[in-house]
Image (spheres, rainbow, N blue to C red):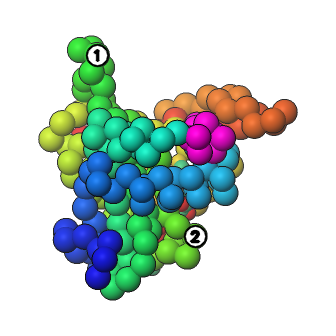
Amino acid sequence: MPGMPAGAAKPGFTLRRLGAADAAAFRDLRLLGLRRHPEAFGAAFEEEAGRPLAWFAGRLEVHAVWGGWQTGAGPLAGVVGLQLNGVAKARHKGVLWGMLVRPEARGGGLATALAGALLEHARSHVEEVRLSVGASNPAAIRLYARLGFSAYGVEPRALKLGEAYCDEVLMALRF
Ligand SMILES: CC(C)(COP(=O)(O)OP(=O)(O)OC[C@H]1O[C@@H](n2cnc3c(N)ncnc32)[C@H](O)[C@@H]1OP(=O)(O)O)[C@@H](O)C(=O)NCCC(=O)NCCS
């Protein structure tokens, strides 16, 4: 099946690390997410829509990004990334970013499986993983709490969309 990867199978999904060759599929899904959920991501659709494919390929080379496909057919259905810190005094922590599942693939455990793959990898590289999530995004906050993340603060007015501000909940999972 074209586009279907070989990789670790979870019930109903196939997961694997993405590489530069996945840049087009990653860009399509990422732009869909930025357009539909502007409050869920720090980046703006308008910023990333103008970037060349090579920029997305570069992101996949620099960051560890996992992708998930619904087993059997279909396009890239979900992604999540891990940013590791190059600064010596901050190397003990990583940042989970860009969690997104295609609307028609939600509710079946794909985000849980993607985060599970990321955490399994992160465990051998960092002491804790952090993330920020929109304060009015209960589905994502529940997901992270179920995975063992706990909130350690709130950043008021973390994002500004037009004239509206969005607070973000800061969460961490310590291994
Ligand atoms: C938040 C988001 C990533 C969740 O993705 P998802 O794949 O639907 O998440 P999961 O399926 O793993 O978990 C969602 C629900 O499905 C349930 N579920 C998990 N595994 C399941 C399975 N095997 N079968 C049925 N249901 C399952 C979970 O219990 C969970 O229920 P809850 O609503 O009580 O928490 C998705 O809604 C999304 O992309 N939202 C827009 C972007 C966004 O907000 N990203 C987060 C930025 S911080």
Using the image, determine if residue 2 lies above or below residue 94: below
Query: Is residue 25 in sight in this rendering?
Result: yes
For mark 1, give the secondary structure: loop
Please tell me whether residue 112 belongs to the stretch shown in magenta.
no
Q: 84 or 31, which is in the foreground?
A: 31
Three-letter amino acid code at the position of disc 2: Pro
Residue at 42% across, 38% down: 55
Q: Which residue is mark 1?
A: 87
For mark 2, give the secondary structure: helix
Magenta stretch: give its range: 42-50
Report if the beta carbon of the residue with label 1 is closer than 8 angstroms to ligand 1. no
Task: Identify the mark at residue 145; answer none if there is no mark.
Answer: none
Residue at 35% across, 66% down: 68
Q: Position of residue 132 (x, y in %)?
A: 52, 38
Report if the beta carbon of the residue with label 2 is closer than 8 angstroms to ligand 1. yes
Report the number of discs. 2
**Quadrant that contains the C terminus:** top left
Q: Which residue is mark 2?
A: 103
